[in-house]
Image (cartoon, helix red, strand yellow):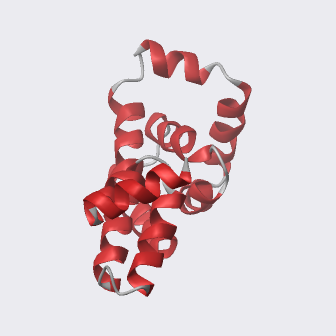
Amino acid sequence: MTEAIHRLIEQYGLIAVFLGCVAEGESAAILGGFFAHQHIFVLWQAFLAAFLGAFAGDTAFFTLGRSFADHPYVVRLRRRPGFRRAYRLLNTHPNIFVLTNRYIYGMRLVGGIAAGLSTVSVPRFVILNAISSAVWAA
């Protein structure tokens, strides 16, 4: 899988880093940093592509939860035990949850949708997500 991502990034450059980071793309971010170290990418551009991809992905998951709560996919996801646990954590510690859910394997999609279904306001989510995305991309 990582080899395929490597080839995509070689072929499509920073666009592939951005798109890879939209969808839980730790490998894309790491390879973006590697190519920046090799002077193939400019460091700040690789950072920006990873940051914007992570931010856009999490914001999309949040929007999915906020706008499509009754969609069959979201309803199915809400029934899973991991989702219920994430939702409980989100309601007890919303700031910490939004800042840290991307660092727990498999929680990024679930965490974003859970945040969208919660009472976390859009501006609060956007600010916390931007902080978390910047730290993650760095």
Q: Is residue 34 above or below residue 98?
A: below
Viewer-side residue, 109 vs 10:
10
- The residue shown at (44%, 66%) is 133
- The residue shown at (56%, 38%) is 110
Q: Can you see residue 83?
A: yes
Residue 68 % position (x, y) = 36, 24
- The residue shown at (67%, 54%) is 104
Residue 58 % position (x, y) = 42, 50
Please tell me in which quadrant of the rendered image residue 21 appears.
Answer: bottom left
Viewer-side residue, 36 vs 22:
36
Q: Is residue 33 above or below residue 93?
A: below
Please tell me in which quadrant of the rendered image residue 66 appears.
Answer: top left
106 relative position to 60: left or right: right
Q: Is residue 118 above or below residue 129?
A: above
- The residue shown at (51%, 69%) is 30
Count all numbered tags in the image, as a single digit. Answer: 0
Residue 20 % position (x, y) = 40, 53
Viewer-side residue, 40 vs 71:
40
Residue 124 % position (x, y) = 40, 58
Residue furthest top as drawn: 72
Please tell me in which quadrant of the rendered image residue 134 appears.
Answer: bottom left
Q: Can you see residue 123?
A: no
